[in-house]
Every structure is written in C-alpha cells, then in structure tokens.
C-alpha cells in the first residue's frame, strides 16, 4: 500500500542554520504531496503542497520539490528561526477527497 | 485558525466508559475525516464522511463509530474504552468533490486520556 517515510528526528539546529527534512514516498499513480506542521499543543497546519511532478511548493521560507524520479519531497529552509520549532509531517493523497497518509513526523528544535 | 472546531479540548475518563467527540467543519466543506494521533502509531486515518454518508474507513476499531449530521457536523463515538485508546483525535475537513482540491484543514484536536 501507499506509504510515507520521513527521516527520524529530533533535528536540532541553531538559528539561521539550513534545514533539510527528508521525505520519500511509495504510491501507485501520481499522488499529491504535502507538508504539515504541528506547533506545540496545536493541530496540524498545511505548510505547503505540490500536486504534480517537478512542482515546487513554498510558504514562509520553506520549500519542497516533487521529484517523481526519486519519489521524494524533501523540505528545506535556508535560515531557520526559533519559531520554526515544531513537528513536521510529510503526507500524500492519492486521490482527491481521500484520506491523507502521513509519515511519522520529524521534530525540529531550533535554539538561539 | 483553520475554521475547523472540535470539542471538548480535553477529556479524561475511565476504562470501559463511552465518550463522544464533536467536530464542526469549515463553512462549505462537505467532507469530514477523523484521525488518531498516538506516540506509537503516529497519525492514522480512522473514517471519512461526505455529505452525511460514510465514504471510507481506515484503521477504525469496531468499538468506535461516527456519523455526520445534516448540518455537516460530525461526532466520533468511542466505547468500551481501553488505556490504549488514549490519544489525540483530530478532525479535518475538505471540499471533497473538487478534483483540484486535495488539502485537508485540521481542527485543534481532542486529547483523550483513559485512566
């Protein structure tokens, strides 16, 4: 079945460091891919998405490119802030209006 | 604020009891999804309703059930609760039916603690 694999955390960085969180997927067809973020004590917020190969999703300085050849959707940010500390989830949806399949989440901790 | 509301925010109950979690989707969204987030299982899809009808089932136990009402709010009923049911339960909504829209918007969750 479809699945998402994320790098294990936690990821600990200093402010202004470069961030990469790896995400690979297994799916039939052409899924849509998402990154969601969960701040402490809150629900999940959609961070960015890409719906087809080579699409780049971006938001709040975060970017991810849908790579069909490597079945990957790695999250990057050039300069992290303390306020980026959260849990990041990679997810896919293989069809409009169906459930999301999530990776296990990666905890990011940024210190000043 | 996603526009999805969930009540209650926290729930503490004993084993064997029954609870009901409530979700109101974003205005205009017809589809409601329920997810369970636990430390060992991560985020797992439980069940989906679309415009009042069950559309898909995931890893939902037989002790759990859900429904979506004519005003589109949804309730998740958990019965014969066990310690292992302690988790965060999220509701999400989307405008299912539009082929270009895949994203789901999540509520703040209900934290269930079974003692």
Image (tube, coloured by chain):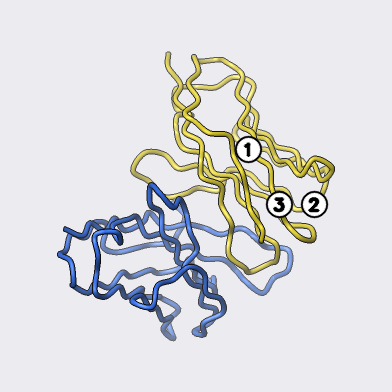
SS type, badge 1: strand
Please give left or right for residue B87 compared with residue A66 in the image: left
Q: Residues within 10 Å of mark 2 (few under 14, many from 20)?
A: some
| Residue picked out by circle 2 | A52
Q: Are marks 3 and 2 in contact (CB under 8 Å)?
A: no
Image quarter hosting the C terminus of chain B: bottom left
Please give left or right for residue B69 compared with residue A65 in the image: left
Q: Residues within 10 Å of mark 3 (few under 14, many from 20)?
A: some
| Residue picked out by circle 3 | A26
Q: Which chain is blue?
A: B
| Residue picked out by circle 1 | A59
Front residue of A39 and B70:
A39
Could you give the CA–CA distance between mark 3 and mark 2, rounded to whole angstroms? 15 Å
Please check whether the numbered discs 3 and 2 fall on a single chain: yes
* Residue A18, image quadrant: top right
Could you give the CA–CA distance between mark 3 and mark 1, rounded to whole angstroms? 25 Å
Mark 2 falls within which chain? A
Percent across and percent down for residue B13 are: 16, 63
The residue drawn where x is 15% and y is 64% is B14
SS type, badge 2: loop
């Amino acid at each position: 079945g479809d699945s998402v694999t994320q790098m294990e955390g936690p990821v600990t960085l200093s402010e202004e460091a470069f961030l990469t969180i790896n995400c690979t997927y297994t799916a039939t067809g052409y899924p849509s891919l998402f990154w969601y973020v969960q701040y402490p004590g809150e629900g999940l917020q959609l961070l960015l998405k890409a719906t087809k190969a080579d699409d780049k999703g971006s938001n709040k300085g975060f970017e991810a490119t849908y790579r069909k050849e490597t079945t990957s959707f790695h999250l990057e940010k050039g300069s992290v802030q303390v306020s980026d500390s959260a849990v990041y989830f990679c997810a896919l949806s293989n069809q409009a209006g169906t459930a999301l399949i999530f990776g296990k989440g990666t905890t990011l901790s940024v210190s000043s | 604020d996603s526009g999805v509301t969930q009540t209650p925010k926290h729930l503490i109950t004993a084993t064997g009891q029954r609870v009901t979690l409530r979700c109101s989707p974003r205005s205009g969204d017809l589809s409601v999804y329920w997810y369970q987030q636990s430390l060992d299982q991560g985020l797992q899809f439980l069940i989906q309703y679309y415009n009042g009808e069950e559309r898909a089932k995931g890893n939902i136990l037989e002790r759990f059930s859900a429904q979506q009402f004519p005003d589109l709010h949804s309730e998740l009923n958990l019965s014969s609760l066990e310690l292992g049911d302690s988790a965060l339960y999220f509701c999400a909504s989307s405008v299912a039916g539009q082929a270009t829209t895949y994203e789901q918007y999540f509520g703040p969750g209900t934290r269930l603690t079974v003692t």
